[in-house]
Amino acid sequence: MSLTLLNVIVAVVIAIAFAAANAAYLVWAERRGAARIQRRPGPNINGPFGLLQPPLDGIKLMTKQLMIPGGADKILFMVAPVLAMAPAIMSFVTIPFSQGIAAHNMEIGVLMIFAFASMGAMATLFAGWGSRNKYAVMASVRAVSQNVSYEIPMLITAITVVMATGSMDLKTISLAQAGGFWHWNIFPSLHSPLMPISFIIFFICSLAETNRAPFDLGEAESELVAGFHTEYGSMGFGLFFMGEYANIVVGASLTTILFLGGWDCPFGIFPGVWWFLLKIYILIATFIWIRWTFPRTTIYGLLNLSWKILIPISLFNLLLTAGLLKVF
Amino acid sequence: MSAPIQLRPDETFILNVGPQHPATHGVLRVKMEMDGEYIVKSETVLGYIHRMHEKMGENRTYAQYLPNLSRLDYLGALGYTHGHVLAIERAAGIEVPERAEYIRAITVELNRVASHLFWFGAFVMDLGGFSPLMYAIQDREHILDMLEAVTGARLTYCYYRFGGLYNDVDDDFIEAARRFIPRMRKSLKKYAALVTGNIIFQKRLEGIAPVSAEMCRKYGATGPVARGSGINFDVRKNEPYSVYPEFDFDIPVYHECDSMARYKVRMDEMEQSLRIIEQGLEKLPAGPIMAEKKPKNIKLPVGDFYQAVETARGSFGIRIVSDGDKNAYRLKLRSPTYSNMHLFDEACEGMLIMDALAFMGSLDLVIPEMDR
Amino acid sequence: MGGYFSEIFYGSKSLLIGMGITFREFFKPTVTVQYPYQTIKMSAKFRGHTELIADEEGKPKCGVCGLCERACPSSCITLGSISVDIEVDGKVKKKKVLSKYELDFTKCSLCGQCVENCSFGALEFSKEYNLASTRKEDFHFNLLKRLEERNA
Ligand code: SF4
Ligand code: SF4
């Protein structure tokens, strides 16, 4: 019993460390990447290639005073940043990085990650409502309606994958795709010929779920100042920021496991954690690339995309897969 | 413990956009009465950056007023100084050498391109795309370098003088301008593919914020805003001044009246400006750059003088009432964005805030220019 | 229905085109100047603050006519003069000599009126642009002193 407890604690600590390190260095990568796209060097003063920038930023944020605006709901205001970060860390616990590296494998891993992911919307809502700022309230209402409408197609596509592999266990799903890239779920199979489209839908939804551009309506810095975290400074802001990046890592990991074969090697040799990391970082690079290319969508454009395009197509795909599974 | 946000009896609330807000690009305050994300009523409040430029014009000599004009619209300053010197020259009867007028036209058009480029970048940034701003600034930087090499300044030029120019352009400038034109054309293609063709961008602009020609007339809107609403009016063509009649260029007009039309007018205008620059460099005559007969201290005859020019934002007018003294009795500046901005209150009623702010971007407001 | 699918198709295509453009930009060299570490040479006509021009003996060319002071739209020039006796062809004459030339650069609009109006050709623009300070007084330039410093 105590051994399991120890296991869990170690796993959580590793998950926090992984999430924090990723968040810090993804900010750096994002800034460098964005700079390259815009033909600037980006942060390059502190340390080689500016690699000391994230810890210094962290120190700066931590030494700032945490201000609570007058009239704000103190409890919600304080809880929100934690709530933004915690679910992301919890999700790491169940993600299998490779055959042997998984903190705690669960039968219903997919479900658990989705459950945690939907808590992110709550953080946004609390932050917006708690700070008593009109911009923040508007932004959080937007973010919630966005999260709700994007969780549906995301879940439907996930169900399609679960049906095709017959398991909700992330490890089993990964293993089912082992043995070369043609086994991956992203490619059409006999049972679900529309898998590439599912992948795109899932990818779009994970962009929207993590409030990333072009779906960053919750932040919308040119309209709503800074969106739901307008009133946050110091580490409150820092936690939101880290939570965002941690969520990106979770989203990329989930996409990798569901569609890109997890830790499987494309050519069937040396499967291992490095393939998994390579895949998620390629996905994250695409996230960054997209963010610095497109303008932001409107709220109704976003809902239209979800309800008129993504949901019908994913539903159709679900029915098709179900039908084909029955037939063959 | 926590106080809820105050709602008015009809469940609307007041949102103060500005004076410090990322979308207003300056110290403009828009007081919006909101119903959720919808704007019920809006009221623009000016006065945060009022510097009494008109009053200054009445207290300074005409020559001393030169630097003021470039502090109105800091993005397209040359157009404004051009209007000022033209007004004084016409009133005082100063003959300007041809070379000087050509150089004025070339630099004004370069400045117009620079101004539109910056607007383009800032507008796309209003819509959430950041990279186009950087690309636009890269191109604009070439123009600023060129202008710096002749005028000595990068933003607030004081280059034109009554009767001519401060100094002549050299071959390097002409060479640089020649090289710039094809590069800019290439960039315009890039912008068309990256931004104009983008589906998200189109969805955000097409059919949004219609401004009818009727409304433009009512508020006196000019420039790209009016031309996006189907009004074919450009001072350069309708009331030709300087050497513009000698150039062959078109006035882009769109009839859709939406934000996209205003956007397209400006994008097309850049191409037309490039054409003018090209022809200007081709035709640039040799000769002096300063009028030979020019009074040292300029005094205008008694009378009322007006000169309109087409700047990057619309038609700018300067009216000088002179009592024969060495400074104006009354000086009035008609700045285009001041009129354009007043459209906003009426047109944005019932709009979503994000569309309204995109609409505001498409009006191309430069706050120090309307709040002078 | 056809419109629905064609919109999805052309929309996705436009997105891919945009991503292609940013992808190409990613591999192009950077264009920025790393300012404090790198500086660029200012163009010959760049207008910094004004400086006095010295004659062959290192004295300012200025004849203290006061034209610049009067022409300046921002009244940022303050002149001072003393008269000294100088010998010309054996006769002693009084001559005004510049004793103070103060430029309040906080107000200067770099318009160039002073340079243009000077009939002695005694003023020029410097090429200095690295001007930054937290104190206003640092921009009250004593041009005479600056000239001496340059001579030394
Ligand atoms: S440049 Fe203009 S403002 Fe500056 S000192 Fe000379 S006259 Fe005055
Ligand atoms: S105008 Fe020239 S000569 Fe006259 S006071 Fe000024 S600097 Fe001296």
Image (cartoon, rainbow, N blue to C red):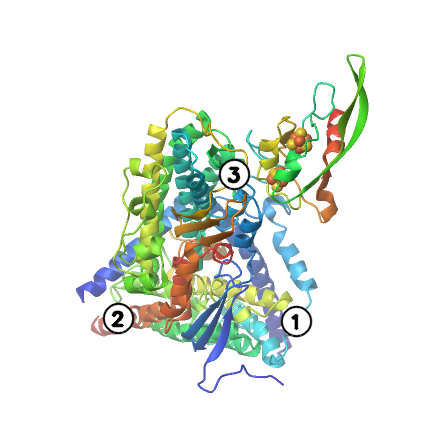
Q: Which chain is indicated by disc 1?
A: A
Query: How would you rate the neighbour count of disc 2 (Cα within 10 Å): few for under 14, some for 14-19, many for 20 or more?
Result: many
Q: Quadrant of the N terminus of chain C?
A: bottom left
- Residue C90 lies in quadrant: top right
Tell me the number on the disc at residue B324. Answer: none
Question: What secondary structure is found at the residue carrying circle 2?
Answer: helix
User: Which residue is outermost to the bottom?
Assistant: B9
User: Which residue is outermost to the left?
Assistant: C2
Q: Which chain is indicated by disc 3?
A: B
Q: Which residue is mark 1?
A: A67
Query: How would you rate the neighbour count of disc 3 (Cα within 10 Å): few for under 14, some for 14-19, many for 20 or more?
Result: some
Tell me if C84 is positioned left or right of B226 in this view. right
Q: CA distance from mark 2 to mark 1?
A: 52 Å
Q: Nearer the viewer, residue A312 or B347?
A: B347
Question: What secondary structure is found at the residue carrying circle 1?
Answer: loop
Q: Is residue A290 visible?
A: no
